[in-house]
Image (spheres, grey):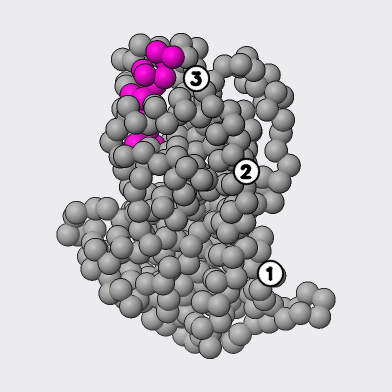
Amino acid sequence: MSSLLLERPHTLPKERVEYEGERKRTPVLIVVRPSSSGMLRHVQGLLKYLPEFGYLPTLTGPEFIHDRAGLIADTRAVRQLRARAKGFPLVHCHGVRAGWICAWAFKRDYPWVWTVHHLLRSNSALVRALWRWIAKYPRAITAVSEAVQEGLERGGIPPERVVVVRGGIDLERFEKLPRKEVMREQFFVPATRPVLLCVGRFVYHKGFDIAIQAMERIWAVFPDADLWLAGDGPENVRLVKLVTRCSRPHRVRFFGYWSAVEELYAAADVLLAPARDAGLGLAVMEAMACGLPVVATDIPPMHRLVEHERTGLLVPPENPEALAAAALRLLQDSALAQRLSRNALQVAEQFHIRHTAAQTARIYQRVLG
């Protein structure tokens, strides 16, 4: 094992070039751990759109990078990654786990890019030291939002090392939505029942507990209203316990990770995004692209996505009453809900993951150049 720690690629691979039709495309190896979150959809978008900008991406990592760190498993992952990277002029890893494996495997001896997707919030000196160690080696570091960039900087990574390449969504996925009445029938929900939706990873900063508290006021006006929670994560048990203590637990449904999330957007009446903090705001972007009215928290990461009273409603953080009041406005004023939805659809194009792929390609060009 100690000999493996000292291994390095003996030489950088000669740039391999492949052709599709008359256009030259440079291969790039995309590395990511198993994921069902926004990081997965980001990577899927790069796999789909990078060829438009001169790169042929190949995915690796989910089959050998484990979610949890372990010396034996990570040593094997390093060995496999080195073997798979042969012949690729560039490696692009996503997330802290893949960043750790890439830093261990390549250090500065191989051109690679590290993209960070989540808010790095740990106060542990050891964890922050790990981030700084990883950040020493990539040729470029990108963050999917300004909030993620700020988290890296708070962790001690020099600001000049980090470039924001905003994440986005694949708008083509939401061009042909299922009809609302069809989805309501599929989920056994009456057409007239109000449905409020939360989508995202079950972590504290998403604020889904605030949405559960807000339902008490909404139930006072619409006793049969449903709250749908789509996602999973470490807060799952706590959220379930909160629901069991509320007045109408049978009106809250947990969907887990729902891969066809557009079905939920099509069936719902309002998206609730009561985040205490946000990295990208993926669910807000997706809801706006689906024409689903949005109520989000009035925090800086949401200002880039939602313009209050024009493309959605913003409410103070940590305020279930304000969240409920805004949701009730939309449920009771269909003209307002439709106006916000139309305006949101007009600006949704700026969220297209194709823009992310274009900017990522420019990062590749700079690294390879």
Disc 3 is placed on an element classified as: strand
| First to last magenta residue range | 202-221
Nearer the viewer's eye, disc 1 or disc 3? 3
Do residues under tags 1 and 3 come within 8 Å of each other at their CB atoms?
no
Q: Is residue 215 magenta?
A: yes
**Residue depicted at x 51% and y 83%:** 366
Mark 1 = which residue?
A: 51
Name the chief secondary structure element in magenta.
Answer: helix
Disc 1 is placed on an element classified as: helix
Q: Say which amino acid is labelled 2.
A: Arg
Disc 2 is placed on an element classified as: helix
**Residue depicted at x 39% and y 81%:** 108
Of the residues under marks 3 and 2, which one precedes in the sequence? 3
Residue 132 lies, in percent from the top left, at: 27, 69
**Residue depicted at x 33% and y 69%:** 134
Mark 2 = which residue?
A: 342
Do residues under tags 2 and 1 come within 8 Å of each other at their CB atoms?
no
Mark 3 = which residue?
A: 226
Instruction: Decide which of 5, 300 is in the foreground and name it.
Output: 300
How many residues crowd mark 2 within 10 Å: few (<14), some (14–19), many (20+)? some
